[in-house]
Every structure is written in structure tokens, then in C-alpha cells.
């Protein structure tokens, strides 16, 4: 009587383990690649969402920009490590009334400024402050961080540029008066171009850029009327 051994040889077991290892490695690479794509897609969606909200807020603020005796539009060109970190401050009728019982609608000083990220100095946070504009009070103070709220983060740079009625573009704009030394307030620009650059990967130096131009009705009408005269 002949007894047959139906087991596997050592060579067959090793071959099966090798094939299984290759298959698992391929599945792992495919899965990790898919997860990276999903993560990158979610990150880009978040960036697009932030850019959309930021541009909507800036557009509404600039559309309500006004020129007063105390306040004009002041755009300052700033740079750090070769990147633009501009600031913008102006009077606007787009005052956000968050508490109707204690706040009233009206003109406000709106300031956009950057704050370095505490965890990564390469990243910037865009802050917006909104304080009521009081008659006869100088409104060019820069200590508005306490009342500011975060509008966008993970930024590489923020740039504001200013256009007159002839389409000439400037990196900075205007000034404001003070009650102690009155001077002529610089007229409003006809439009403001805002460019936001968000980090995709700071280590790989990749970023996503968004840009929009906002017409300032008060500045456009004033400039057009002056040009016609």
C-alpha cells in the first residue's frame, strides 16, 4: 500500500509567501496613493472654500467704502521673506452688526492685516477687524488685533493693489487725516485687486493663487465725475 503525502513543499510555501507579499505591497501602495489623492482633494476644497468666503467678505466691505474727514483708504505694501504681507484699512458702510441690542449699523473702520501662524512662521493668518467710526476721532490706529476675527489661514502671501479710473495700478494707496493735523484725504481708488496665495505644501514650496478685482462705487463715481469736469 502506497501512502501519498498531499502537503506543500518548503519551496511552494516560500513561493506562495513571496507572491502574497508582492500583492499586499501593491495593494498598500494603491491604498496609500488613493488616500493621498483624497487628502489633497479635501485640502484643495478647504482652500477654495476659504478663498470664496474671503473674497465675498472683502467685496462687500469695499463695495461699501466711503470717504470721510477722518478716514480714507490706506493700503500699505509690506514684504517678509520675499512674500507680500500687505495691510488694508478703510471706512465702510458694511459694518457687521453681530449684536443688534448693543450695536447699530453705520460707518466703521475695517482693517485687514496679517498675523504670523504660531506653529509655522511660513504661514500667515488673515484677520479682519470692524470698529465703529466715530466723528472727529482719528481712525488710523493699528492696534485692532484684539477685536479682529480670523478670516483665512494657511496663507503664503496677501497682496492688495489699487487701480485708478485710467487703469493704472499701484502697490500702495492713500492716507488718512488726524484731528490734530488736518490734511486732504487721498481720494478712493476706482478698484482694488486682491491676490491670496494659499500653501498646498510648504515643504515642497507649492501654493495655490486666487485673485479678484473689486469695483469701489464711491471711488469710481468720484473719479469719473472729476475726470469729466
Image (spheres, rainbow, N blue to C red):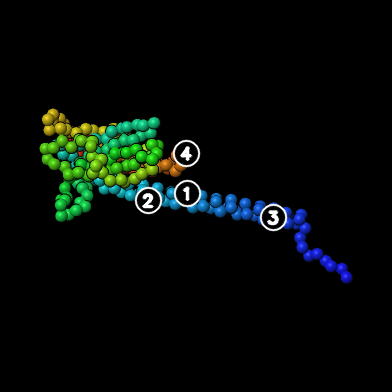
Q: Which residue is mark 2?
A: 49
195, 1: nearer the viewer: 1
**Mark 4 nearby-residue class (10 Å; few <14, some 14–19, many ≥20):** few
Q: Earlier in the sequence, mark 2 or mark 3?
A: 3
**Label ID, residue 17:** 3
Query: Is label 3 in a helix, a strand or a loop?
Result: helix
Label whose residue precedes the other's in the sequence (2 or 1): 1
Q: Nearer the viewer, mark 3 or mark 4?
A: 3
Q: Position of residue 144 (x, y in %)?
A: 23, 40
| Mark 4 vs mark 1: in front | 4
Residue under label 4: 203
Residue drawn at the location 45% of the way across and 39% of the way down: 202
Q: From the viewer's perspective, is 221 left or right of 45?
A: left
Which element type, helix, strand or loop, lies under badge 2?
helix
Q: CA distance from mark 3 to mark 4?
A: 38 Å
Q: Residue at x 35, y 34 (%)?
A: 84
Which mark, by number, is residue 40? 1
Residue 106, position as x, y percentages in the image: 16, 48
Residue found at x 25% / y 45%: 61
Q: Which comes sooner in the sequence, label 4 or label 1?
A: 1
What kind of element bears circle 1? helix
Amino acid at each position: 500500500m502506497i501512502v501519498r503525502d498531499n502537503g506543500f513543499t518548503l519551496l511552494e510555501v516560500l513561493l506562495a509567501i513571496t507572491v502574497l507579499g508582492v500583492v499586499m505591497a501593491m495593494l498598500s501602495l494603491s491604498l496609500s496613493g488613493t488616500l493621498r489623492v483624497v487628502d489633497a482633494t479635501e485640502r484643495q476644497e478647504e482652500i477654495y472654500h476659504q478663498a470664496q468666503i474671503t473674497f465675498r467678505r472683502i467685496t462687500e466691505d469695499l463695495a461699501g467704502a466711503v470717504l470721510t474727514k477722518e478716514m480714507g483708504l490706506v493700503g500699505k505694501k509690506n514684504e517678509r521673506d520675499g512674500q507680500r504681507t500687505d495691510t488694508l484699512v478703510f471706512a465702510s458702510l458694511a459694518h457687521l452688526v453681530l449684536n443688534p441690542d448693543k450695536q447699530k449699523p453705520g460707518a466703521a473702520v475695517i482693517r485687514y492685516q496679517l498675523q504670523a501662524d504660531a506653529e509655522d512662521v511660513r504661514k500667515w493668518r488673515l484677520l479682519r477687524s470692524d470698529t465703529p467710526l466715530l466723528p472727529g476721532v482719528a481712525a488710523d490706529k493699528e492696534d485692532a488685533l484684539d477685536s479682529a476675527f480670523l478670516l483665512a489661514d494657511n496663507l503664503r502671501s496677501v497682496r492688495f493693489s489699487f487701480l485708478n479710473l485710467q487703469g493704472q495700478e499701484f502697490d500702495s494707496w492713500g492716507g488718512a487725516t488726524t484731528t490734530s493735523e488736518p490734511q486732504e484725504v487721498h481720494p478712493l481708488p476706482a478698484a482694488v485687486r486682491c491676490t491670496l496665495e494659499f500653501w498646498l505644501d510648504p515643504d515642497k514650496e507649492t501654493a495655490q493663487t486666487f485673485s479678484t478685482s473689486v469695483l469701489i462705487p464711491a471711488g469710481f463715481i468720484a473719479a469719473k465725475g472729476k475726470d469729466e469736469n
